[in-house]
């Protein structure tokens, strides 16, 4: 499923126009992004999962082409962890 499919399904289930559904989805995703970037770095959606911003420490790596040591600076990445209920539902079927 891609974003377009999600918009079509939202539109079908709610009876809203596709353009309105797209606006809702865009705003929802923007809110999640804003809280991950500017907020505390954690968004919990009950019975679905948790988006979390984690820091990756600085590391040394070897460039395979010239065998020189390269320092990879620390950076942040976003991880998603499914909730227990969502995991059980997706693994073992519907409730």
Image (cartoon, rainbow, N blue to C red):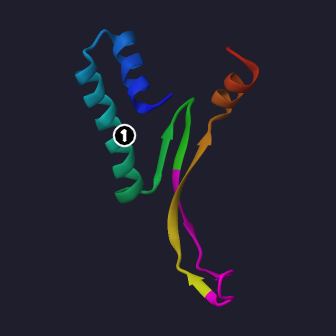
The image position of residue 64, as x and y in percent, is 69, 80
Residue at the extreme right of the image, as rendered: 92
The answer to whether residue 32 is above or below residue 8 is: below
Quarter of the image with the C terminus in it: top right
Q: Give the residue at x 31% y 9%.
A: 15
- x, y percent for residue 55: 54, 67
Q: How many marks?
A: 1
Q: In terms of depth relative to the viewer, which is nearer, 65 or 63? A: 65
The image position of residue 18, as x and y in percent, is 28, 19
Residue 58 sits above or below residue 44 on the image? below
Say whether residue 42 is left or right of residue 80. left
Would residue 89 be found to the left or right of residue 77 on screen? Answer: right
Of helix, strand and loop, which one carries label 1? helix
Residue under numbered circle 1:
29
Report the residue at 29% width, 23% height from top: 21
Residue closest to the far front: 65
Q: Quadrant of residue 66?
A: bottom right
48 is within the stretch colored magenta = no
**Whether residue 92 is situated above or below residue 40 in the rendered picture:** above
At label 1, counting other C-alpha atoms closer than 10 Å, the crowd grade (few under 14, some 14-19, many 20 or more) is few
The residues colored magenta run 52-69
Q: Residue at x 53, y 32 (%)?
A: 46
| Picture residue at 42% right of the left edge, 53% below the top | 36
- Residue 53, percent from left and from top: 50, 57
Q: Is residue 28 above or below residue 40?
A: above
Left or right, 43 with reference to 94: left
Q: As rendered, which of 39 and 1 lies closer to the eye? A: 1
Quadrant in which residue 60 is drawn: bottom right
Verify whether residue 60 appears in magenta: yes
């Amino acid at each position: 499923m891609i974003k377009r499919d999600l918009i079509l399904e939202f539109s079908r289930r709610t009876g809203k126009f596709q353009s309105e559904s797209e606006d809702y989805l865009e705003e929802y995703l923007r809110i999640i992004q804003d809280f991950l970037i500017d907020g505390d770095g954690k968004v919990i959606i009950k019975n679905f999962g948790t988006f979390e911003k984690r820091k990756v420490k600085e590391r040394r790596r070897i460039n395979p082409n010239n065998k020189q040591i390269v320092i990879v600076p620390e950076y942040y990445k976003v991880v998603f962890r499914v909730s227990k209920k969502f995991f059980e539902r997706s693994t073992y079927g519907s409730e």
